[in-house]
Image (spheres, grey):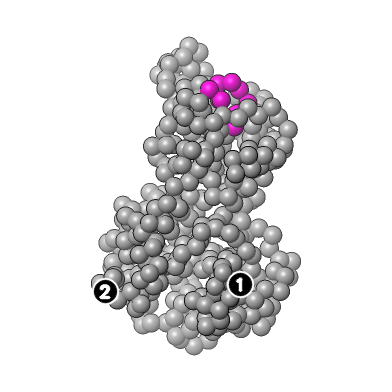
Amino acid sequence: MVEQVVILAGGEGRRLKGLSQGIPKPLLDVAGKPFVAGLINELARFGFRDFLLLVGPFQIPFQSLLPGKIHPEVNLQFVSEPCPAGTAGALSYARDFLQPEFLLVNGDSFFDFNYLDLALNLPREKWLMKLALRFVDDTNRYGAVILDDTKVAGFLEKSRVGSGFINGGVYLMKREILEEVRDLPCSLENDVLPRLVERSVVFGKEYKGNFIDIGTPEDFHRSQSVLRDWRRRPAVFFDRDGVLNQDTGYVYTKEKFSWLGGSREAIHYLNGLGYLVFVVTNQAGIARGYYEIDDVICLHDWINQELKLSGAHVDKFYFCPHHPSAGQGSFTRSCACRKPEPGMILSAFQEWDIDKRKSFLIGDKNSDVEAAGRAGIKGHFFKGGDLYSFVRDVVESLN
């Protein structure tokens, strides 16, 4: 599994003179926070925690402006350049910090798709790079990518007018590409990529998410509004036992956890559509003394690791440890989070920017559906069967 994200963040923003005021382009404020902070937080949503930022000569600004604005569990490392080395040259300076496979992301563009999916369905042939591609009506500003089935066959210059695929600025990459960095400065786009294409080791896949590059004044100003809108997403809330896994009673270890048909596929499908995905589950076994809070947390971490193998993830697990009468101690009490109370769903509304109008819950008990109604969203009763088909039908009914 790919664990590391490398961000090219040393761009000066020459086309943004008058806006950058000496601040590197990825640190410019967009929709209330440094652009690269929003990018890191979005990637962290998919479970990435290990970030390597290639910051050119700007390490001090990054160290001073990013703290307090990124996911608290993210680990940041910075690699600077003693002199301008180009995008591939910046990677070569980071050689000792790179994992064998990593995700490389442009620090001045945002492509809204399921990043985990890029590591799925890898070619059987030898590969060194896989690109996330975006189809646009006019490739004039970006240059076009020529595909031969899934293999990248070449590139067309930026002056070309017309529709086609563009490089979305997100790459799955092997560290071996550094063998193509022969002299400095060295450009990934102009020097390394063409040589790799000649060796037939570059592949691409189209994704349909929102895309913006803040490299021009026009798009920089447009990003202030569109990114704020894009961050607001619909959400799907799943009950856990009986919906995602077999309900055998008080499931709290991976040995007792058994996926139900279509559950991983359903989550992957929703990730691809841009939905936030949450689990909201009553865990009265904690109040009853059958297991501890840490057992539930460990199980949920394991579930997300399993989902990652399918290119999927849950954004957050919410669970209620209480019961109004069973057990002993502080967890034996009435609360606002045990379904049918809506507390877990309301907590998600407070913590995330959720479009409630398009959000819904799927559960297998009346208390699940009732909790959804009390929270102001639609609840759907799942009676078993293939969860992916059920979810797809619900989503299609909303469009």
Magenta part of the chain: 362-370
Disc tally is 2
Q: Which residue is mark 1?
A: 164
Residue 165: % across, % down:
60, 71
Q: Nearer the viewer, residue 362 or 89?
A: 362
Q: Identify which amino acid the numbered label 1 is placed on.
A: Gly
SS type, badge 2: loop
Q: CA distance from mark 1 to mark 2?
A: 32 Å
Above/below status of 345 relative to 88: above
Above/below status of 368 relative to 294: above
| Residue projecting furthest to the bottom | 183
Query: Can you tell which of label 1 and label 2 is closer to the viewer?
Result: 1
Quadrant of the rendering where the C terminus is positioned? top right
Tag shown at residue 18: 2
SS type, badge 1: strand
Residue 334: % across, % down:
43, 16
Q: Nearer the viewer, residue 90 or 36?
A: 36
Quadrant of the rendering where the N terminus is positioned? bottom right
Q: Quadrant of residue 223?
A: bottom left
Is the residue marked by circle 2 packed among few (<14), some (14-19), or many (20+) residues within 10 Å?
Answer: few
* Residue 368 belongs to magenta span: yes
* Residue 342 belongs to magenta span: no
